[in-house]
Structures are given as structure tokens and as C-alpha cells.
Image (tube, rainbow, N blue to C red):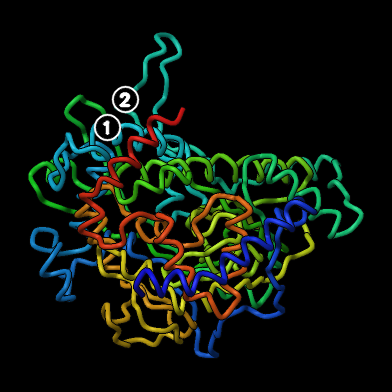
Amino acid sequence: MNRREFLKATGVAGVSTAVAGAAIASNPKKVMALDIAKEQDDFPAEVTKDFKGFSFQNCMFIRGFWDNEPFEDEYIQKTYAKEFNTIPAALINYFGIQSGVLKGRTHDPNKIGYRQVEIALSIACASVDKHFGGGGKLGATDSPMQTYSINPMTKERMSDTPVFVQGLYSWDNSKVDKMLKQGKQQYKFKDAKDAAKYVKKATKFLGADLVGIVPYNERTKRWTYTEWATPKTKLFTMPDGRKEYLYFDPIKLQKGEYETFGANVEKSDIVKKAGFEPKSIIVMAFEMDYDAFKAAPSYVANTTVQMSYSTMAEVTHKVATFLRELGYKALPCGNDTALSVPLAIEAGLGEGSRMGMIVTEKYGPRVRLAKIYTDLEIHPDKPKTFGVREFCNVCMKCADACPGRAISCEPSKVLKEGMEFDTGKVSISNITEVEKWYCNGERCFSYWNYNEAGCSTCIAVCPYNKIDEWHHDLSKLMTLTPFKSLLRSLDEWFGYGGPVDPEERIESKYLIDAVNDFWNKI
């Protein structure tokens, strides 16, 4: 579209803006609180009768601990797999750089966005999850954390005696059992709607940005992983004499060898492992920083991703504690236990998108998800739609901007094993028998490792990724009109998201300015 065609087409937007201005003048509260979502009785995407669930051992991160087969994808072989030609090699190198064990090689260490100051902030943001969350980020259910005993006489850490204790995602409900055994009664709400009011308020007060409730029933049980998987560890003595259980061999890693030890896999059974039958699932979304995401794919964007994981661990622990103090059992979960995106859709928090992430009304795709299973009966929410599917079918901005060429430009469809798309073939890491857009997880993660700072470019360029202002509410309305195809053009015209071309973006003044703006905005 040339400039003349663009201005002609967007004349409609100009009229809409004028009308909106008059509306704001007369009733600003109503316009600012625009809600265009429609409740749905069923899950808003086809799930076939052949859907058999998804095993967590096939998640890209867990495959990095057992799947040693070389990448088959020709694009990966030609681009990012010259040295890291298996998922374990890419995973362990990525983790090594993320944790500061290895030095990055792709970017100049003085390059803005990849300097030590950005890396240090990213590690700091991840520290609560790493030190207290246990393995929730890697999908370990009821995850413990590694720590060390303290000598009570000298106050010194006994670094040669690592132990494991309950982490923030602990499923320990023994205090509730003890309370009930001692005769203390559960707090009684008036009804399930009353419970929803108090639980939602408490959950937001304790730090969640969005919250929805899902009933634990046959429809939602299908999103529980068919198998749970936890990476295996081994005990190593570090150069300073400290002993530590690790997912990889640190000595071999320093030599450029990428050894992992497999994964413990078990058939999922919430009732057996938790000791009770849940009645409700509390699904939470945590906003990630808008200014940080403008700087994707640099470390600055990675900082807010890591911060959200730390926040998830902290808040789910607090909400679980709130429920337990009321006499109800709770299972706090991060990436573990069940698929978070479909549960968030069931809870009315948003819709699925071309990039594979949930898109919320308020924050777009700029959220991370967690959930809590509980035996408290809470009035459930319903799935909501507000035009994401229709818009994603015509936009494709995330696909064009993806530096790993992982997001397909083809329409959404029910994925089947072995299907081929413009960005690759459906693999064991794809959920099949569900209608969705195809994303190539191997390509995505290969680029994460190559870039050394993750990526998140798809989130950054998404036209739904907007701060909460009235003219962005107008953008939402446009996605429901015949002019929705123009929204991407409008988005780029006004400079949102930055350059779409991946090679241009990584070297652009836009990215440098975004990093500097992040640090300068105090």
C-alpha cells in the first residue's frame, strides 16, 4: 500500500477518531472502560475427538534433556545449527549464558542491549524464581529448591552439604490437614460467587494482574499434561569446593561439550499426588513491562520475562497460602502440571494467537501465566472472544518479524502429526488435534540460543501490544470491522513495535533508542 492509498483508506480511522473525541468529551469513563469481549459457552477453537492431550516430556525445554537427535529442519541446519545441532546443545549453551556461566559469542559485549549491565539485570530478575521457586519454570511439579545447611555456631554455609527443601511452588497442604484435624472449620463463603469475589480480589491484591476461574471438570482436565517430566540432576563439586546438583556437566560445558542426564517421566495424576480432588483452577496473568519489550530481542526484553517468572513464583505462593489459611488445599503451578494457554482461554483471560501465545484485551500478548488448583468451589468464568482469531488471520506481523522464521503465515487449522507448513513440519512439540496456527518450536529455540538473550520479537511487534490508552481502545474496535486489515499498516505508520525486518531490527537505531529509553526512564 502506498502513502496515498494508505491515507485514503485510513480516512475512516480519522472519522472514527473524531467521533471518539466527542464521545470522550461527553462520557470519558465509558469510553476508557471499553469492553468488546463476548462470552462463549464452548472452547473457542476446535478440539477433535482424537485429541489425546500433550506429554510434558515433549516440551521443547524438556526435550533438551533427552532428545539427542540432530535437527532435521534444513533452515536450522543452514543457520543456527552449525555448532549447536541438537536441542540439548542449544539448551545447555543458552542456560549457561543466561546464568553467567558462559560468555556469549554472537554479540559484541559492548553492544547496547547485550552489555554486562543488561545481562546482570536479567539474572537479578530471575533470582527469586531460581533461588526459591525450585524447578517450576522447567515444569517440575511440587518443585523443591536447593539450599545449604547453616552451621549454627559459625553461621557459615555448609557448601559441601546441599539439601532440598520446599520451594515456593510446594504442594504441601499438611498445615490444612492439621488445622481440620484439630477442629478448625473451613471459612464458609455465602456461595461460589461470593468465593469468586474474595479470591479474585485477594489474588490481584497479592500481585496478579489478571485472574479468571476455571472449573476442574472433564473439559478442563484434558489440558493436564498426560505425563509430567522433571530433568534429572547429578551432584558435582565446583572449583570453589561447593557441591551442587546440576542438570548438566559444568566441566564438560566449559570444554564445549553439552551433556545432560535425561528426564524422570511419570503419568500425571493430580488426585494421587496431591491427595485431594480439585474443584477449581485459579488462572493468573502477569503483565510484562511495555518499555522493556520495545527493546526485543535484546537482553532488556529478557529482563521483564525473567522478572515475571520471579513474580509468578512469589504470587502463586502467596495465593496458595491465603487459601490454606482459610482451610482449603492449594496446588501452586508455574509452567508445570497443565497447559497454561488453553486454561487461560477457558478462564476468559484472552484468545489464542498466531504466535501461539494468549492475547489479552488489556496487555495483548505481553503476559506470563500461572495457575492454582484448589478444593474450594469458585464460580467459574467463561471463554471470551474479541476478534483475535479474525485479526491474526490477516495481520501476520509476528510471522514477518520472527528472526527464526518459526511462525507460519498460513491460516489456522486443526494440526495433525506430520503436517507440513511454510515454516516446517509438525513435530512432537506441537499440540495436535486442536485448531491453531503452526509454530516451529525447534526454529524458535534455535534462534533463542543464537541470540543468547531469548527473543520475544513476536510479542513486541504485535498490534495488540499496547499500553492502556483510549486511542488503543479504538484499535481494538478496528479489529472487529472490515477495516481490520488496515490496523497493521496503522500500527507501523505510527511506529509501534519498531522495524519488522529481523536483520534491520537487530542493527537499528530504533533498538538502540529503545534500550536507552528503558534505562533513562526513572
Q: Residue at x 53, y 70 (%)?
A: 11
Residue 225 visible within the image: yes
Q: Is residue 326 left or right of residue 433?
A: right
User: Which three-letter amino acid code belongs to the residue tagged 2?
Assistant: Ser
Quadrant placement of the N terminus: bottom left
User: Which three-letter amino acid code belongs to the residue tagged 1?
Assistant: Lys
Q: Position of residue 502 (x, y in %)?
A: 25, 60
Which residue is at the front of the view, 399 or 70?
399
Q: Position of residue 209 (x, y in %)?
A: 62, 48
Q: Is 10 rendered above or below residue 512?
A: below
Q: Residue at x 36, y 55 (%)?
A: 456
Secondary-structure class at tag 1: strand
Residue under pointer 1: 243
Q: Position of residue 318 (x, y in %)?
A: 64, 40
Residue under pointer 2: 159
Residue projecting furthest to the top? 153
Which mark is on residue 520? none
Secondary-structure class at tag 2: strand
- Say whether marks 2 and 1 touch (CB < 8 Å): yes
Q: Is residue 253 left or right of residue 127?
A: left
Q: Is residue 256 left or right of residue 413?
A: left
Which residue is at the front of the view, 171 or 22?
22
Location of residue 325 by image quarter: top right
Q: Position of residue 240 (x, y in %)?
A: 20, 24
Residue 277 visible within the image: no
